[in-house]
Image (cartoon, helix red, strand yellow):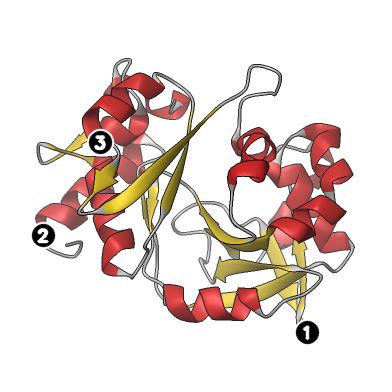
Amino acid sequence: KGTRLNSITKGIPKVLVPINSKPFIYLLLESLVNNGFKKIFLLVSFKSDEIKNELGLFYKSIPIHYIEDNIKFKKGTGSALLNAIDDLPEHFLLQYGDTILNINYQEFYKRSKNLRNSMLMSIFDNKNNLDKNNVYFKNNKLIYLNSESKHNLDKLKTANFIDYGLLGIKKSFISKNIEILKKNESLKFFQEKLSHLNLIKTYIVKNRFYEIGTPKSFSDFQNFYSNGELK
């Protein structure tokens, strides 16, 4: 929906907000297709019919599968994952829908596919520039800090990386830990609990991400795109 972006979205889904007259979702899909994706699942909720009508069932011959939110669950990425899990393949990548990444997807995919009892999280040495850090990583140990928890206010000050926005997950792994996800239906809660169980492996990314989650980042994104930094 893009609540933080209300002044710009003006009632339309965030992914349909135009960037130089082109809806953002096309820039995201172009990035994914250029990086070799052959099947794309969109977890949709707010005004999903507008997204479907805009995109249709294919993008450049790549099939798009839509998975609708279920009213039985809360709103949010964790709930969407919980609702979608039966329809997803055994191994998949989960990416935030308002972000374009500069990452080696194929390497990330292969590394996550080799994991048996953990999932792979991409992180970036952000230095609190793009957004507030939410990951503490040291001596090959990752702790994800749920920014929505009041218990983490002081801990977040020690965070030295940021969640980059891409996870490598296996359905069988989710099934083993489904009760943690069901408990709160929050992806942030889920990731924090898994990190304390040492069930998250780390993939460090060297290049920044680009996102449209806030008015400031949206403005920056437009400038980067206009200047040719984003193709």
Q: Is residue 67 left or right of residue 198?
A: left
Q: Is residue 180 left or right of residue 65?
A: right
State if disc 2 and disc 3 touch (CB < 8 Å): no
Foreground pick, 74 / 150: 74
State if disc 1 and disc 2 touch (CB < 8 Å): no
Q: Secondary structure at mark 1?
A: loop
Which residue is labeled 3 in the image? Answer: 55
Mark 1: give few (<14), some (14-19) or many (20+) Cα within 10 Å: few
N-terminal-most mark, 3 or 2? 3
Amino acid type at circle 2 is Asn
Which residue is labeled 2 in the image? Answer: 227
Amino acid type at circle 3 is Leu
Check residue 113 in the rendering and tell me which mark sits there, or answer none.
none
N-terminal-most mark, 1 or 3? 3
Image spot of residue 14 (x, y percent): 35, 31
Image spot of residue 43 (x, y percent): 50, 37
Labels 1, 3: front one: 3
Q: CA distance from mark 3 to mark 2?
A: 26 Å
* Residue 147 appearing in the image: no
Question: Which residue does the image show at 56% across and 26% down from the upper left?
Answer: 69
Q: CA distance from mark 1 to mark 3?
A: 44 Å
N-terminal-most mark, 2 or 1? 1
Check residue 139 in the rendering and tell me which mark sits there, or answer none.
1
Q: CA distance from mark 2 to mark 1?
A: 39 Å
Image spot of residue 144 (x, y percent): 74, 58
Question: Which residue does the image show at 36% across and 69% down from the upper left?
Answer: 102
